[in-house]
Image: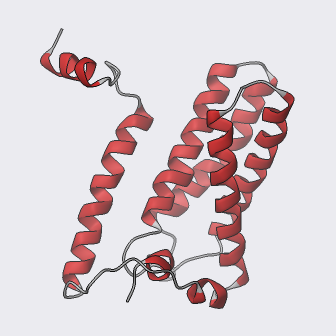
Amino acid sequence: MSDLAQTFRRIGLPRRLSGNMILLIVAPVAYGIISWLILKSAGNPPVHFRIDVSPLIEAAFVVKLHVVGAVIAFVTGIVLLRGVKGSGLHRKLGYTWVAAMGLTAISSFFITGLNGHNYSIIHGISAWTVIALPMAVAAARRRNIRKHAKGMTSAFVGGLLIAGLFTFLPGRMLWTIFFAV
């Protein structure tokens, strides 16, 4: 057994890291570096936690719709990941989650600004989500639970956690709501 595998075993990590686990490790590191670079280029302004929802209140309707969809999808997704699988409640919450994820992904195509007036890499994640959601639902209907679980978990990790993390970059609306002075 390699030293790395022994270290993983000692601290309770699996021997092999899945793609989602790798993304969950790499994304915060990338976020930290990008945030540091943005803040450094802005002269290292002070960063203090505070809440000011006025940017959200003043935002366009599609942005509000996007945020509502993302919040519903995040909360419902946590419940689904932690709860009992295969029950009627799981199925109902699952369709709610798919609808909220679809709303979030589709509404993102009407929001630009990170990359000027062009689409950014986050829109690529949205396009992937629009394709992956029906495929994962179809897998569940065909009783291919492993493919269903992998697809839905990947959509949660990529579409909500990682894309959501990058909505908190300095200068973006969520950063302004929670951290700007």
- 114 on left or right of 31: right
Coloured how? secondary structure
Name the one closer to the observer, 74 or 106: 74
Please report the residue visible at 22 percent of the width from the left and 73 percent of the height from the top: 37
Residue 49 in picture, x, y percent from top left: 39, 77
Q: Vertical placement of 132 versus 56: above or below?
A: above
Quarter of the picture holding the N terminus: top left
Please report the residue visible at 74 percent of the width from the left and 40 percent of the height from the top: 134
Spot the residue most to the left. Answer: 3
Residue 25 in picture, x, y percent from top left: 32, 43
Q: Vertical placement of 127 versus 179: above or below?
A: above
Name the one closer to the observer, 120 or 70: 70
Please report the residue visible at 31 percent of the width from the left and 47 percent of the height from the top: 26
- 70 on left or right of 141: left
Spot the residue most to the top. Answer: 1
Name the one closer to the observer, 71 or 129: 71
Q: Vertical placement of 68 versus 129: above or below?
A: below
Residue 114 in picture, x, y percent from top left: 45, 76
Query: What is the quadrant of residue 88 in the picture?
Result: top right
Residue 86 in picture, x, y percent from top left: 77, 24
Quarter of the picture holding the C terminus: bottom left
Q: Vertical placement of 119 versus 44: above or below?
A: above
Query: What is the quadrant of residue 116 in the picture?
Result: bottom left
Q: How many dots with numbers?
A: 0
